[in-house]
Structure formats: C-alpha cells, structure tokens
Amino acid sequence: MHPFRAAVEARDTAAIEAMLADDVVFTSPVAFKPYPGKPITAAILRGVLRVFEDFRYVREIAGADGRDHALVFTATVHGKQVNGCDFLHFDEDGKIDDFMVMVRPLSGAQALAEAMGAQFAQISAEVAGGAPS
C-alpha cells in the first residue's frame, strides 16, 4: 500500500501534509484554476476529508519510475456516489509536487462542488493561520 493511501485511509492529516512539497500544485475536479502551494492544498485535503463519506481507495496504479501514482477511489457526497482518481506526481525528494483529482459522474461532481464550496470559509481561515479542525 502506498504511504499516501495509508495516510488518507487513516485520516492522518499531519502525515498527508508532510508528503506535500512546498510548491505542490493541486488541480481540483470542480475549480477552473489550480491551487499552488502546500498551505492551500493541505487545507483543501482536510476539507475533502470532512465532506467525503464512505471514502475508500479501490485500486493503485504506479508508473515504472515510481514517481507517478494513480489512486482510484469511491465515496459518497450528500447521498451521491462519486468515483474518482487522485493522480500524484512525486518530485526528486519523494514529495508530492503535482496533485490532480478527477471525479465522475456529473451529479457526483456537482455534489462535491457544492460541499466543498460550503467548506471554503474554513479552508480560507486555515490558510490564513487559523487552526485546522
């Protein structure tokens, strides 16, 4: 099992954040522009852990060089089933420097967009220096 998967499944936000490069870029499935930087990426991932219900990874796919990983998942958001994939790229220091998420179906993506929109005040406060919860 990949260490990132283990950290997510354990809901270990400190371990998740420790795996992020300072210059990580997070590409959301529901936002047009990517989010650059560790603080916002970590806060978004904490928000995702708050909104996903019944989250579980169902498959891992690794590139030959070990620097690219795809983690396929299922979850529920506001009663809608979501299938998705976390695409991770690791830099030369073994930190995640590119994190892209894709989800389907459209109804699940819409539910995720709504749920994460409701999280953004807290996410913004965490990035500004408020304590994560």
Image (cartoon, grey):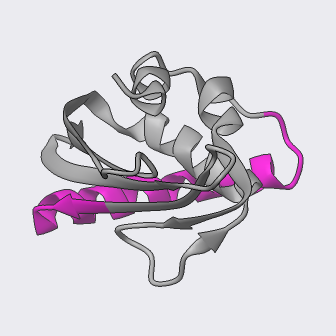
- Which secondary structure class fits the magenta region best? helix
Q: Can residue 49 be seen in this view?
A: yes
Residue lying farthest to the bottom in this orientation? 32
Image: 61 above or below 40: above
Q: Work out whether residue 82 or residue 79 is closer to the camera in this orientation and state it.
A: 82
Q: Is residue 122 visible?
A: no
Q: What stretch is highlighted in magenta?
A: 102-131
| Left or right for 30, reference 71 | right
Task: Give the position of the C terminus as an image quadrant.
Answer: top right
Residue lying farthest to the top in this orientation? 10
Task: Give the position of the N terminus as an image quadrant.
Answer: top left
Residue 62: % across, % down: 29, 45
Q: In which quarter of the image is residue 13?
A: top right
Residue 98: % across, % down: 53, 63
Residue 104: % across, % down: 14, 61
Q: In which quarter of the image is residue 94?
A: top right
| Left or right for 27, reference 128 | left
